Image: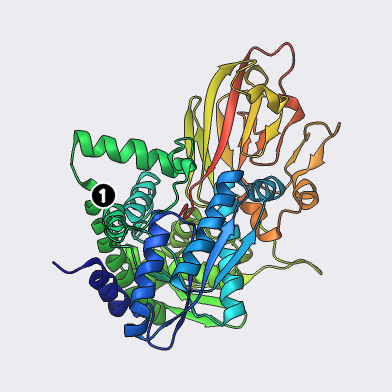
Amino acid sequence: MPSLLDRVRRTIRDNALAPAGSRVVIGLSGGADSVALSLLLAGLSSDEGFEIARLAHLNHCLRGPAADEDEAFCRALAGDLGLPLEIDRVDVGALARGTRTSIEEAGREARYRFFDRVADLTGADRIAVGHTLEDQAETFLLNLIRGAGARGLSGMQVRTGRIIRPLLDVSHGDLRRFLAERGRSFREDETNRDTRLLRNRVRHVVIPFLEQQFFPGIGPVLARNAAIAREDAAWLDAEAGRAWDRVARPGRDGVDLDCTLLCREAPALARRVALRALETASAGRFVGFEHVEALLAMVRGEAPDAADFPGLRACRDGTRIALRARKGPGRGTRVTQPGFSRPLPVPGAAVIDEVGVTIRAERGLWPVGGGVEQLAAGSSGRVAVVDWAAAEGPLAVRSRKAGDRFRPLGLGGTKKLQDFLVDRKVAARERDRVPLVVDRLDRIVWVAGHAVSEDFRVTGATGAVVILKLEDWGDWA
């Protein structure tokens, strides 16, 4: 059986992860995976002809003295290996509050921005991170639960831009044995066992349950399925590229589609072509599944000959559809059609795959305990509490539409949603991605992640409440 070093060497060679002459930055947290990654790449660099430009450690300032001990450990390891180390500190908690994102998402964004800076500083063309087989299995399962297609089920790629993942086919157990054999220690992050976090629930609850009840050793099976889906998606993308050449005519002002030819394509290819056409013509606007299906309905002649999509208008003339950007006087493109709409059962959840979030709803009595009453009848980033009696059920989650107004909590009057989002400094390209929880009368209950409506605030007279939670499920890696 090949050694762990040889297995990683093969992954690097087969995928051209670090060819001779390349310069690599290694993300080093101090945990077992990143320590093993540093040792393995240090051992391979000379033979393979690549150079380790830096180890890079970001102190998230979240765990007090433990985070400082992680930093000290990484300094000692870098000195022991004779490798240069770049360290930075970011108050991720403050960053999450300032950007109204989760701690996990803020930490991930801060890490990759830091890695990019270090790579730019050192002229590195590769950034190595320590994602493993288990991480891949978790990503596959998360995306499967969310209803992702072949591309989503592909999980993490062994290379994405200059990010490389040499350990994606290696298990945590293999890495810990590798470290034990060399007498190497590592740091344990207790937050990795916090099952309030979605990925940790999958890691510590869902996968162990599946292993105990159905299939021992399911992790490698899930990772293999991700690899198969990745190969399928790559083939479909290549075929879709050829289909694009047959049916699409891109130009400076948009894209034209040949409806007759597009109808002859297999549905999987037609969806990819339609998605590419919408993305190309909309100048970077978000395009969701519903938009793709609506365009294909036009292609098949099952919908009106003209329709608005994010940032563009589609018009059919005979057997051709022209997609053209829409602009108002002195302004950029403008969206008039909602991009998504889902029912929100109470209790239950609405999965918004177009923007990669889930909104959960739970019933409770006020005060609900557990610190939630500290939300003061309003919203705290990813959680909101609203008066159930004030809402005309059932609830739903939708994207914004023209003319939306609501009464932001504490402002004392109504406000256009557009103006509210501008005041909150939500980027134009992101405003159509903000989920809105609405009641049966289509009144905005919660601008998810931002504000509750005054009409639904809890008071001293409130009895039953609904607790709303916003969960991201993007990469989570």
The residue under label 1 is 219
Q: Is residue 445 above or below residue 18?
A: above
In this view of the protein, which residue sits in the foreground, 251 or 317? 251
Q: Residue at x 69, y 14 (%)?
A: 462
Q: Is residue 230 above or below residue 336?
A: below
Image quadrant in which you'd find residue 32: bottom left
Q: Residues within 10 Å of mark 1 (few under 14, many from 20)?
A: many
Q: Is residue 471 above or below residue 315?
A: above
Residue 264 in sight here: no
Residue 107 is left or right of residue 240, and the answer is right
Residue sticking out furthest to the right: 412
In this view of the protein, which residue sits in the foreground, 215 or 463? 215
Q: Where's residue 228, x and y in %?
A: 25, 62
Kind of residue indicated by mark 1: Gly
Q: Where's residue 319, x and y in %?
A: 45, 73
In this view of the protein, which residue sits in the foreground, 54 or 280? 54
Q: Residue at x 68, y 20 (%)?
A: 390
Dividing the image into 4 quarters, which one contains the N terminus?
bottom left
Dividing the image into 4 quarters, which one contains the C terminus?
bottom left
Image quadrant in which you'd find residue 20: bottom left
Residue 94 is left or right of residue 409, and the answer is left
Q: Residue at x 36, y 62 (%)?
A: 36
Element class at badge 1:
helix
Tally of marks: 1
Residue 154 is left or right of residue 129, and the answer is left
Q: Is residue 308 above or below residue 398?
A: below
Q: Residue at x 76, y 66 (%)?
A: 328
Q: Where's residue 470, x and y in %?
A: 57, 39
Image quadrant in which you'd find residue 86: bottom right
Q: Where's residue 426, x and y in %?
A: 72, 53
Residue sticking out furthest to the bottom: 21
